[in-house]
Image (tube, rainbow, N blue to C red):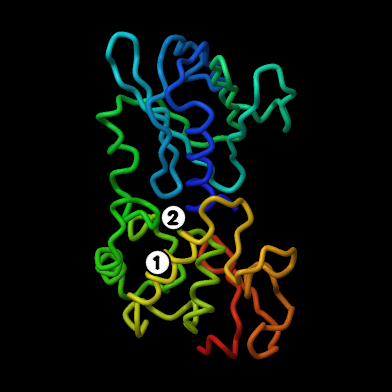
Amino acid sequence: MPEGDTVWNTAQALQRALGGQELLGADFRVPRLATVDLAGWTVVESASRGKHLLLRLAGPDGRRLTLHSHLRMDGSWRTYPPGARWAGPAHQIRVVLRTAGSVAVGYHLHELALVPTTEEHTLVGQLGPDLLGPDWDPAEAVRRLAGHPDTPIAEALLDQTNLAGIGNLYKCEVLYLRGVWPWRPVRDVPDPTGVVVLAQRLLAANRGRWTQSTTGSVHRGQTTYVYGRRGQPCRRCGTPVAKADQGDRVTYWCPVCQPE
């Protein structure tokens, strides 16, 4: 699930493959960027901002551009040695970046855009504090959450303008661990600071690995407390885990450990 930790890991993988390298070519398979030529441009930095990827480039003429992409639910970047066979369906490829030592392929990317680096704020400036970024500030995250007192806490945590990086998996897991009913209004959450601090700890614990775990185990079937476990026994009390639609997502919770 491409949440903040997955995007952070992807940014690091692109940095290792492309960072400091000159592009030999770029093949954009989206109409608005199809004629863009980035040959001769240098990859300065690969960074993440919440769930957004920012590939910063320097041109031979001194210009700076940022290639922005969003993975949403099904996007990914993969890197290969030159000449290696690419995995994944070819029709899902949206961009290919080539250097002398690596090829980076973006599959099913969303919101793909190329903007002057000085204008990155037009794409990510609305985001709240990044749980895995240098701007992480739990007090600011709580302040922003408090600005939506009537919103159910589960929906407020997914609002990237409050805090950036939490997706559906971490939403469910954090609220379970804090014993909070997902439909409780923000104003009634007893310790919102504890919620956001725990969320940051969980995401940070998964930096550097692709298996997302909130339990401490990376074994199949043991990585989450409630997420993806409808009908299975709660790991604390044995009550069957519940699942319901909430907003445009689904929520998993334990009716006993997270009472209404």
125 left or right of 36 in image: left
Residue bearing mark 1: 156
Report helix, strand or loop for mark 1. helix
Residue lying at 35% horizontally and 85% vertically, measured from the top left: 190
Instruction: Check whether the beta carbons of the residues at disc 1 and disc 2 lie within 8 A of each other.
Output: no
Q: Which residue is mark 2?
A: 165
At label 1, counting other C-alpha atoms closer than 10 Å, the crowd grade (few under 14, some 14-19, many 20 or more) is: many
Q: CA distance from mark 1 to mark 2?
A: 12 Å
Query: In which quadrant of the rendered view does residue 224 lie?
Result: bottom right
Disc 2 residue type (three-letter)? Gly
Few, some or many C-alpha atoms within 10 Å of disc 2 (few <14, some 14-19, many ≥20)? many
Q: Nearer the viewer, residue 220 or 162?
A: 220
Residue 176 placement (x, y as % from top left): 54, 78
Left or right position of 95 against 241: left
Q: Where residue 146 appears, x then y in whole percent? A: 27, 72
State left or right for residue 88 relative to residue 166. Answer: right
Q: How many marks?
A: 2
